[in-house]
Amino acid sequence: MDDVEANVSEVVDESNNINSESYDAAENNEQNQSKKESDNKEETIVASQTIVTDEPTHSIQEFIDNSEALGYKKEVVAGALFSCKKSELTKTEFEAMVKEFLGKKVE
């Protein structure tokens, strides 16, 4: 009788170990999946930052000289870039500054 109880006890212990291993494996899989998603988000952020830095820069004078081609009068571009601290800008930065300048109310 003791042998039967010992065998039953061993089977129960083995079953618990298998369930525990399965649970641990599932938990590790979830952690790995979460880490992969986090890595993908970091790659996306880095990629989007790289795109912005790859944009060519132009001097303020180039923007003023070519203002008509960009769709603005020289006076507008000169006013928008008057207080600019940078000597060179990307086209995206330039457009943001001009839109902000044009959005201001005249007092």
Image: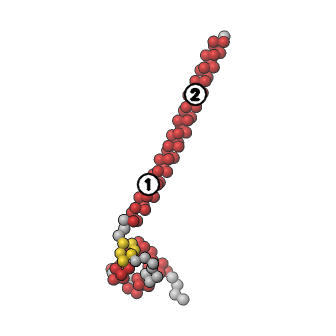
Q: For numbered disc 2, what is the local secondary structure? A: helix
N-term-proximal mark, 1 vs 2:
2
Residue 25 in the figure: left or right of residue 3: left
From where the camera sits, is residue 19 visible?
yes
Q: In the image, is residue 35 above or below residue 71?
A: above
Picture quadrant where residue 72 is located: bottom left
Picture quadrant where residue 50 is located: bottom left
Picture quadrant where residue 91 is located: bottom left
Residue wearing tag 1:
43
Amino acid type of the residue tagged 2 in the rendering: Asn
Residue 103: x, y in percent? 49, 80
Residue at 42% across / 61% down in the picture? 48
Q: Which mark is residue 32?
A: none
Q: In the image, is residue 39 above or below residue 52?
A: above
Q: Nearer the viewer, residue 37 or 60?
A: 60
Q: Quadrant of the N terminus?
A: top right
